[in-house]
Amino acid sequence: APGQAAVALCGIVASTSLMVAMAVMVASFRGSVDEWLGQLLPADLYLHIEGADAGGLNPDLQARLAALPGVAGVRFVRQMPVRLAADRPPVALTGQPIKADPAAALPLTGASRSVAAGETPAWISEPMARLYGLAPGDTLRLPVGGGLTVTVAGVWRDYSRQFGAVALDAKDFEALTGDLSKTEAAFTLAPGLAGAPVARAIKAALPPALAEQTLIAEPRQLRARALAIFDQSFAVTYALEVIAILIGLAGVATAFSAQTLARTREFGVLRHLGVTRAEIGWQLASEGAALGALGGLAGITLGLVMAQVLIHVINPQSFNWTMATSVPWGLMAGLLAALVVAAAGTAVIAGRRALAVSAVLAVRNDW
């Protein structure tokens, strides 16, 4: 019954396409975040001061930390909120060594351009560029200290600040704000040295009150924590994907139940011709498998198209950042196989009632 099969097929296509679209979007987002963390965390050890009342690392503390045994190099960062527009949330203004090698300091989305003599370069995050309509070469007024007009030298990828961030070279930041303290540090250790002993030495070098509000971690720990938070945030999405597939299979079960009950006389004739219940069961299983494969392939194709809309249209409009498409082909193959098996099993289970009728009673209306 092609008409009834089409109804069942619509349920599979709809649920599968929804699951595939969401799975590809989440996989692309997770892959982009993982790659971004790899670019953002090239050092061996990271320090972050938590809490607005914790103060920061003054120049003396900075010199003391840089001189610790095992520390081959250290990059200090200062971050503070700045409100550029009264009707918009504050953006993050950061100061760190950038001018020497912008591509090493920031995960740039393109090449960093040079600015004219006398101009102050600034590197803005991707959400900042989209929210404020800025591009390399444009100017931006920072209402900090006496105020400063900067020239956008590049755009960098940032998935941690949805409302934007502006990065200045450390010397330009200090000249603008007059603030020499730092709130973050990235340590490069001597070759072959473990991070744990240096982390303990850093903690011991800090004042007790400041040490209590200081987080020190290796990049693998920060990455694992960030990805764990990401997975927890999308746990509901994964559950909705499973529910969507179950709804599709429920549609298959309903359609096959109706079809098999309508085909009771057909099965009775086949039984009189010598076809066994097992052979009819295999026939139903093959029909269900074919329907599941067709619906799965159509759903995956439609889902991949929907995913491109989510990734390249909806996501930038909603969150102001972009990502590269990453298709979990293993998940797609597993989903298709699961759909084929589930649809075949559902068809067999749905046909058990019709097969339970005796061959004689199934064709009694034809006597």
Image (cartoon, rainbow, N blue to C red):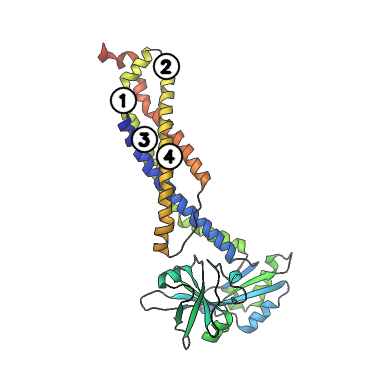
Q: Residues within 10 Å of mark 1 (few under 14, many from 20)?
A: some
Q: Which residue is mark 1?
A: 261
Q: CA distance from mark 3 to mark 2?
A: 24 Å
Which of label 3 and label 4 is nearer to you? Answer: 4
Residue 84 image position (x, y, % from top left): 42, 79
Q: Which residue is mark 3?
A: 252
Which residue does the image show at 39% across and 63% down from the upper left?
317
Whichever of labels 3 and 4 marks the residue nearer the N terminus, that label is 3
Farthest residue toward the front?
116
Q: CA distance from mark 4 to mark 2?
A: 30 Å
Could you tell me which secondary element the residue under label 4 belongs to?
helix
Whichever of labels 3 and 2 marks the residue nearer the N terminus, that label is 3
| Circle on res. 87 | none
Q: Which residue is mark 2?
A: 276
Residue 269 image position (x, y, % from top left): 34, 15
**Mark 1 near mark 3, Cβ–Cβ under 8 Å?**
no
